[in-house]
Image (tube, grey):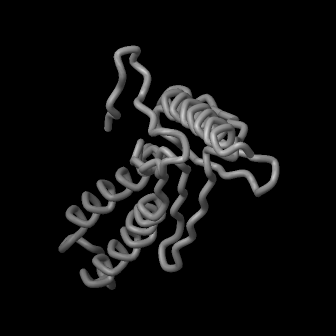
Amino acid sequence: MTQPVTLSGRPMTPPPGAPVEELLVARFRGHARRLFWSALVLVAVCGATAYLYGNLPEGFEDWTLLAAAGAAVLVLVVVPFLVWLSRSYTITTRRVIVHDGIGARRRRELAHARGYSIGVRRGPLQRVWGAGTITLSNGIDAPLRLVNVPSVNLVNEVLADQVEVNQILAHRDAQATGA
């Protein structure tokens, strides 16, 4: 999503005191590399079930094979996928929003205008995939963690830019109102 820019390349800003429209900057989920083992289990369970169906030793029935395969797929494939799918991150021009939870949704927000420190932690495998964990801390609330963020360097730059722009606008509006 792009914003209109002036000739100098800077985004156009509204006049002091005017309400600023909240625009979507980015919406993403954690890196999908966590689902690699689930995909591998799905392929292995399908292959083993196809091979063993009708070829089971005496004393076993095909329905037990199908029940075991279904349980394995449910626990080792569907549940990890739903956990991955249940967490999403949204960055707007005003705040960072984290949605989390399968049944009961939890939502945490952190406003850019309040300012916060950005910490990035990357393990060896995260470096290979270009992912990382971003911790946002404003010193008052509990830190907000964005786990397994894909393209972590780009997201880090976007967050730093949004904090800078929002603090400049807040300072300008405070100066305009005489506070």
Total tally of numbered discs in the picture: 0
Q: Residue at x 36, y 50 (%)?
A: 40
Residue furthest to the right: 139
Instruction: Measuring from the top left, give residue 159's x and y in whole percent.
Output: 56, 36
Query: Does residue 103 appear in the picture of this structure?
Result: yes
Q: Is residue 99 left or right of residue 67?
A: right
Q: Residue at x 32, y 31 (%)?
A: 4
Q: Is residue 137 above or below residue 101?
A: above
Instruction: Tell which of 38 and 172 is nearer to you.
Output: 172
Q: Is residue 10 left or right of residue 165?
A: left
In the rendered image, the quadrant that contains the N terminus is top left
Instruction: Measuring from the top left, give residue 118's x and y in whole percent.
Output: 68, 36
Instruction: Tell which of 45 and 85 is nearer to you.
Output: 85
Instruction: Tell which of 36 and 102 is nearer to you.
Output: 102
Q: Is residue 58 above or below residue 156?
A: below
The quarter of the displayed image where residue 141 is located: bottom right
Q: Is residue 169 above or below residue 17?
A: above
Instruction: Measuring from the top left, give residue 37's x and y in whole percent.
Output: 44, 50
Residue furthest to the top: 8
The quarter of the displayed image where residue 148 is located: top right
Instruction: Measuring from the top left, give residue 178's x and y in whole percent.
Output: 71, 43
Query: Does residue 133 appear in the picture of this structure?
Result: no
Q: Residue at x 39, y 76 (%)?
A: 71
